[in-house]
Image (tube, grey):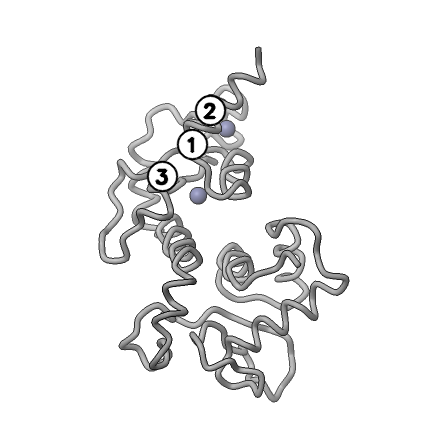
């Protein structure tokens, strides 16, 4: 039911890469579609342990998570490994994992997507270029609504459709769309719908 490894990766990314199980749980239940399992935390812990080489439950597939204080300490703090996507890294995929990688392509791409949206240098350059910050989905102007309080409180969304993401290519400023936090959440919540799809949807609702 509901909770996948992809959701846990997204939650941890949103939480800055590292968090306690109960915070991961709070974030995952916001992202994952209903119905949720009766005990989301237990289910999340099980998914994490299956993708953590230091645990007995490790599935010998990609090694995505690690315990912050060591598995034996049982403190419940987990983080995303530094670069689980790089096969040459010691923490990378095990041999024979290619078929699984293929099946997990969408999730891997989600991680690339999130990573690119969190590239501080790129986002800073993108924001510096915006003369009049306005959400490209709903049209809200930050300056008009928030003025001095938070005219620059805009987020950057990576527009390349997830299936077309190329691991090796880099992101240019043209790949990014300015969106406000709410619209950004809507886009991600609905399977990374296109910014223009959300814009059209909102237009229709206004009528
Ligand atoms: Zn918006
Ligand atoms: Zn986004």
Determine whether the residue tagged by mark 3 lies in a helix, strand or loop: loop
Lateral position of residue 65 relative to residue 34, left or right: left
Rounded to the nearest angstrom, the CA distance separating label 2 from label 1 is 6 Å
Q: Residues within 10 Å of mark 1 (few under 14, many from 20)?
A: many
The quadrant the N terminus occupies is: bottom right
Determine whether the residue tagged by mark 1 lies in a helix, strand or loop: helix
Q: Nearer the viewer, residue 126 or 79?
A: 79
User: Is tag 2's residue or tag 3's residue first in the polypeptide sequence?
Assistant: 3
Q: Nearer the viewer, residue 37 or 23?
A: 37
Residue 90 is tagged as: none
The quadrant the C terminus occupies is: top right
Above/below status of 24 relative to 82:
above
Residue 186: x percent and y percent? 54, 37
Quarter location, residue 158: top left
Rounded to the nearest angstrom, the CA distance separating label 2 from label 3 is 13 Å
Q: Which residue was labeled with disc 1?
A: 195
Instruction: Check contact, mark 3 vs mark 1: CB within 8 A.
Output: yes
Lateral position of residue 164 relative to residue 76, left or right: left
Q: Which residue was labeled with disc 3?
A: 159
Q: Which residue was labeled with disc 2?
A: 199
> Does ligand 2 reach within 8 Å of label 3's beta carbon?
no
């Amino acid at each position: 039911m509901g909770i996948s490894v992809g959701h846990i990766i997204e939650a941890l990314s949103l939480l800055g890469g590292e968090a306690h199980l109960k915070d991961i749980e709070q974030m995952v239940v916001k992202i994952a579609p209903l119905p949720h399992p009766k005990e989301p935390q237990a289910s999340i812990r099980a998914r994490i342990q299956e993708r953590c080489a230091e645990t007995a439950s490790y599935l010998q597939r990609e090694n995505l998570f690690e315990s912050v204080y060591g598995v034996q300490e049982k403190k419940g703090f987990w983080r995303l490994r530094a670069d689980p996507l790089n096969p040459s890294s010691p923490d990378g995929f095990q041999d024979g994992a290619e078929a699984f990688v293929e099946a997990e392509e969408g999730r891997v791409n989600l991680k690339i997507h999130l990573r690119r949206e969190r590239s501080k240098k790129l986002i800073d350059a993108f924001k510096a270029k915006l003369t009049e910050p306005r959400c490209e989905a709903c049209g809200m102007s930050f300056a008009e609504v928030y003025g001095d309080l938070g005219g620059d409180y805009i987020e950057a969304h990576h527009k390349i459709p997830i299936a077309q993401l190329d691991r090796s290519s880099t992101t240019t400023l043209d790949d990014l769309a300015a969106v406000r936090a709410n619209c950004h959440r809507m886009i991600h919540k609905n399977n990374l719908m296109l910014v223009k799809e959300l814009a059209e949807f909102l237009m229709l609702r206004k009528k």
